[in-house]
Image: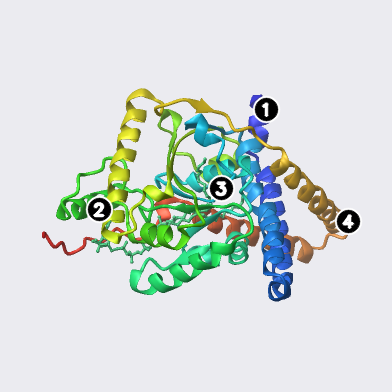
């Protein structure tokens, strides 16, 4: 067991995973570009194909979490609601304090069969990330600049486009708008105080406009809000590098299904509703801190083999030509080819390191970090 663990942390294993992810990802991005003419002929068919192509990329990261690192994910939820997950469109509201929260979200999407079609309100900067960001254009992910004046029209338009989406999806919203840091927390609590809102201990003050515009534009096509609160056992702060090193974590996710009809239509009332929701989420986190679990029963959505099968398919397809290339390089080794190969490997690992950096809280944006002039009325 210890030997296997040691093997998983070897650089050569990491390189193989990165190589398969990057090369297959770029091939899939290319295939996605090839679907462009189809959008003009049959938009719904183009969407269905892109859902499957997207699955081939995102499921590789799910495979890394589930099969490589062996991370376990426990779901706390009401068994009646459980039966509806994956069978309806939903807006997911999730806390944003962990580097791999999106990946745990993806794992649950996979288990309920909505991984290829799932959406998120994502910051525009992520659209430039090779493979994942490029894939998102074709999956109609909604991007925002986190500047309301610019976002209000574009976000509403992108949401309207989803109204006739052909497969069930979950639309993820991190209402905190950025990842939790002590400084951002302190500043957002000053904002809370100035608005006369109770302080939160475990969350940043939620930004309400994105939630309101999402609910308004998807009303009638989305059945419910899934209020989701994620935590990791033993106070762990997992990260993507840990996953790639084969480190096992245990995630707990508490989900409450709230029918969309219960959410007020009026903007101010909807904002007040969301603030109350975050006060409740804070109490669930307190419960978790005190007892090590969320309230209510647990259910285990079964792990599916498709993510692993997809990874094995791409690995077989791409490792064979790599092997041939390496053999040729060794047999005809000249100092120039060796230097060129080392340069390419270094460039690839720097590129992947930059991509992983996008998930790191230490490199988080300055959004929510600046003191705002407070208006105490
Ligand atoms: C059964 C299983 C269930 C669940 C499984 C879980 C999940 C799986 C689901 C789906 C998975 C799918 C995909 C996942 C894959 C990858 C995801 C990866 C990452 C993407 C994530 C991001 O990029 S997060 C960042 C972008 N998103 C957001 O920001 C969303 C939230 N933001 C908003 O809604 C904003 O309102 C906005 C972006 C629309 C506009 O922002 P802007 O800043 O311009 O305006 P605001 O309204 O927010 O700001 C002005 C108001 O805010 C007050 N203010 C000022 N400072 C602060 C502060 N520090 N904190 C809080 N509030 C502040 C200010 O006073 C203004 O107040 P008003 O009263 O005037 O509104
Ligand atoms: C098989 C696995 C191979 C893995 C190797 C390569 C890994 C490449 C990883 C690329 C990941 C890109 C997807 C990024 C999703 C990041 C989600 C995120 O957390 O974004 C932060 C924003 O919400 C808020 O930003 P901040 O304001 O906090 O800043």
The label shown at residue 87 is none
Which residue does the image show at 35% across and 48% down from the upper left? Answer: 180
> Of callouts 2 and 4, which one flags the residue occurring earlier in the amino acid sequence?
2
Whether tag 3 and tag 1 are in contact, CB under 8 A, the answer is: no
Q: In the figure, residue 277 lies in which quadrant?
A: top left
Q: CA distance from mark 1 to mark 4?
A: 32 Å
Q: CA distance from mark 3 to mark 1?
A: 44 Å
* Residue 359, position as x, y percentages in the image: 49, 52
Q: CA distance from mark 3 to mark 4?
A: 57 Å
Which residue does the image show at 48% across and 71% down from the upper left? Answer: 157
SS label for mark 2: helix
SS label for mark 3: loop
Which residue does the image show at 26% across and 52% down from the upper left? Answer: 272
Label 2 crowd (10 A; few <14 / some 14-19 / many >=20):
many
Pair 2/1: label in front: 2
User: Does residue 301 lie above or below 328 as drawn?
Assistant: above
> Of callouts 2 and 3, which one flags the residue occurring earlier in the amino acid sequence?
3
Q: CA distance from mark 2 to mark 1?
A: 46 Å
Which residue does the image show at 30% across and 49% down from the upper left? Answer: 273
Residue for badge 2: 188
Q: Quadrant of the C terminus?
A: bottom left
Residue for badge 1: 3
Pair 2/4: label in front: 2
Q: In the figure, residue 137 lies in which quadrant?
A: bottom right
Looking at the picture, tell me which residue is in the foreground, 236 or 59.
Answer: 59
Residue for badge 3: 88
């Amino acid at each position: 067991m210890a030997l296997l663990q040691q093997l998983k942390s070897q650089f050569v294993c990491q390189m193989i995973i990165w190589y398969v992810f990057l090369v297959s990802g770029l091939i899939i991005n290319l295939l996605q570009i090839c679907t462009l003419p189809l959008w003009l002929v049959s938009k719904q068919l183009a969407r269905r194909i892109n859902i499957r192509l997207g699955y081939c990329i995102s499921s590789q990261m799910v495979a890394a979490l589930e099969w490589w690192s062996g991370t376990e994910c426990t779901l706390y939820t009401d068994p009646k609601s459980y039966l509806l997950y994956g069978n309806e469109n939903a807006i997911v509201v999730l806390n944003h304090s962990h580097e791999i929260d999106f990946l745990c979200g993806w794992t649950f999407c996979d288990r309920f069969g909505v991984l290829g079609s799932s959406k998120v309100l994502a910051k525009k900067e992520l659209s430039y990330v090779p493979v994942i960001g490029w894939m998102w254009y074709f999956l109609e992910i909604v991007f925002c600049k986190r500047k309301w004046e610019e976002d209000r029209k574009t976000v509403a338009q992108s949401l309207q486009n989803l109204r006739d989406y052909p497969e069930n999806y979950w639309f993820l919203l991190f209402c905190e708008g950025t990842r939790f840091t002590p400084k951002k927390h302190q500043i957002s609590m000053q904002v809370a105080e100035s608005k006369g809102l109770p302080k939160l201990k475990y969350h940043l003050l939620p930004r309400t406009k994105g939630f309101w515009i999402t609910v308004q534009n998807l009303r009638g096509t989305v059945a419910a809000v899934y209020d989701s609160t994620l935590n990791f056992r033993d106070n762990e702060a997992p990260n993507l590098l840990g996953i790639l090193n084969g480190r096992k974590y245990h995630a707990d996710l508490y989900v409450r299904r709230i029918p969309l009809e219960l959410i007020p239509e009026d903007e101010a009332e909807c904002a007040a509703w969301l603030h109350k929701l975050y006060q409740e989420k804070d109490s669930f986190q307190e419960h978790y801190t005190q007892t090590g679990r969320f309230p209510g029963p647990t259910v285990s959505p079964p792990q599916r083999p498709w993510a692993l099968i997809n990874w094995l398919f791409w690995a077989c397809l791409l490792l064979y030509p790599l092997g041939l290339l390496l053999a040729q390089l060794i047999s005809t080794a000249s100092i120039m080819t060796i230097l060129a190969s080392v340069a390419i490997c270094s460039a690839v690992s720097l590129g992947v390191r930059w991509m992983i950096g996008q998930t790191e809280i230490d490199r988080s944006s300055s959004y929510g970090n600046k003191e705002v002039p407070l208006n105490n009325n």
